Every structure is written in structure tokens, then in C-alpha cells.
Amino acid sequence: MIIKEGKGILGVRLQDGEDLLDSIKTVCKNYKIESGIILNGIGMLREVKISYWNGKEYLTELVKDPVELVSLQGNIGTTESDGDPIIHIHVALATKDHKMIGGHLSGGKINNTGEVFIQKLENILLIRKKEKNGIMGLFPA
């Protein structure tokens, strides 16, 4: 992983085989990002887990073959209890036959390369906590 920081924005270059979500969590811990915006991401992924929220639970599908990471965006908050980073990302992926698939990113490894840009939020703390209906919501503090 290669990281460059400038004026609240981090450019992160990920290498083949790195776990995308774990890598972003590592960046958050190392750069003390409690709240942030994942501005975008491009590259390739493999062994991708994408999920769809049906109102009660996530339905997850595994895409083993490499796919183009066409779009990645999300947010970074912290848990109410221990302050650990919670990464919430949605992706659009292109298969080798140019079909688009996407949803909530539940996991995936970098295939060849990946590039992600993260903006730190200053003076805004995003806390992810469980609501009465059981859904995890993001609350500005």
C-alpha cells in the first residue's frame, strides 16, 4: 500500500492481493480518521462479496472472477462503543463481458491494482449505531 496525504485528502494505491476493506481500516487507524468520505475508487477486484439489503438482512453474492472496479464510494464512521472505524461502501463492477453489477461491498481483494481517495472530515464526528428497528444508522455527533 502506498499513501500520499495532502490537505485532508489521502490518495491510496493498493497492491495485488490486498484486502480492500482491511486496507481502508488500516489507513483510518494509522491516519486517525474517525469520520470521512470515500470519494472514489477504481481498479480491479477479485473474490468480491456484494450484498443487497432486503429490508431485514443482507443477501450476499460471491463474484470470484476478476472484475473492473468502475465506481466506489462510501463513508467512514466509528462505532458508538469502542470507536473502531466502520467502512460503508457501495460499488459498481464490470464483468469481462461488460455487464454491470453492484451493491454494498462486503469484501474483496485487489486484482492487479486499486486506487482510492479518502477525505477526512474535520469537526464532524459520524457515529454508527443501531436504531430501534435494528438498522445501523449513521448519526452526526
Image: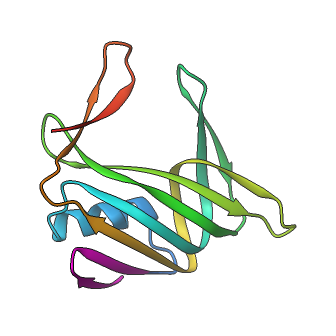
Q: Nearest the camera: 34 or 46?
A: 34
Q: Which residue is drawn at 78% across and 64% down?
A: 95
Query: What x and y, as percent, mark residue 4?
Result: 28, 86
Q: Which of the 4 quarters of the picture holds residue 22?
A: bottom left
Asked whether 11 falls inside the magenta stretch, the response is yes
Query: What x and y, as percent, mark residue 29?
Result: 18, 63
Q: Nearest the camera: 90 or 24?
A: 90
Query: What x and y, as percent, mark residue 24?
Result: 34, 64
Direction top: furthest residue: 132
Quadrant that contains the C terminus: top left
Q: In this view, does 62 lie to the left or right of 24?
A: right
Q: In this view, does 16 lie above or below 138?
A: below
Q: Which residue is drawn at 44% across and 73% down?
A: 116
Q: Which residue is drawn at 26% across and 47% down?
A: 77
Q: In this view, does 63 lie to the left or right of 28?
A: right
Q: Which of the 4 quarters of the picture holds residue 42?
A: bottom right
Q: Is residue 27 above or below residue 123?
A: below
Q: Is residue 61 left or right of residue 125?
A: right
Q: Main secondary structure of the magenta part?
A: strand
Q: Is residue 5 above or below residue 27?
A: below
Q: In this view, does 65 lie to the left or right of 59?
A: right
Query: What x and y, as percent, mark residue 106?
Result: 50, 48
Quadrant that contains the N terminus: bottom left
| Residue interval drawn in magenta | 1-13
Asked whether 61 falls inside the magenta stretch, the response is no
Q: How many marks?
A: 0
Q: How is the image coloured?
A: rainbow
